[in-house]
Amino acid sequence: MKKLFLALIAVMLVAGVAMADDKIVEIPFKKVPDLAQRMVKIYFPENSVVKAEKAKSKDMKNRTRVTLDNEAILEFDKDGHWMIVDCHSSKVPMKMVNGMIQMYLSKNYAGHEVVYMGREIKNGDITIVLDDATELHFTNENKIIE
């Protein structure tokens, strides 16, 4: 659990530093890209949006950050595709995880919950963090990176 906490703090610091130099503007949820709005409504129907923000810079490429009432933080690219799903003390809904990755997790990490997913901007690789702080990396074709 300590590793998970440290990993999440590191991710938050990197995200915080990345957004520190950006122009961050709070926006109404209805201004969030449509795809992102649908994802929030489908995958987090029990939660309400606390805040939506837009960051504008060359590095962040107009990312949108949505914070939910369960403290989950979701970041989306300019088109509304998820880039970060950080659920802190809750879990990422499994239906949000790609089917091939779900099969890998159920076979190799049964009983564990996904608490963080992140996607690389440049190559689409996916990082998954489980509730026991296990960090897994997958290619954009959903193959495990050993």
Image (cartoon, helix red, strand yellow):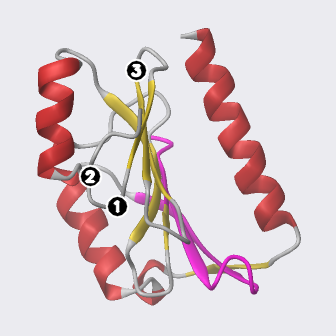
Cα separation, mark 2 vs mark 3, equals 20 Å
Q: In the depicted view, which residue is nearer to us: 52 or 55?
A: 55
Q: Position of residue 124 (x, y in %)?
A: 43, 65
Q: In the depicted view, which residue is nearer to us: 102 or 96?
A: 102
Cα separation, mark 3 vs mark 1, equals 22 Å
**Please, what is the three-letter code of the amino acid marked with disc 3?**
Asp
Q: In the depicted view, which residue is nearer to us: 9 or 119?
A: 119
Q: Position of residue 123 (x, y in %)?
A: 49, 68
The residue that disc 3 covers is: 131
Is residue 6 depicted above or below 144 in this figure? above
Residues tagged 2 and 1 counted as in contact (Cβ below 8 A): yes
Q: Nearer the viewer, mark 3 or mark 1?
A: 1
Q: Residues within 10 Å of mark 1 (few under 14, many from 20)?
A: few
Can the viewer see residue 37? yes
Can the viewer see residue 45? no
Q: Is residue 8 left or right of residue 96?
A: right
The residue that disc 2 covers is: 142
Is residue 93 depicted above or below 54 in this figure? above
Residue 140 numbered tag:
1
What stretch of residues is rendered in magenta? 49-74
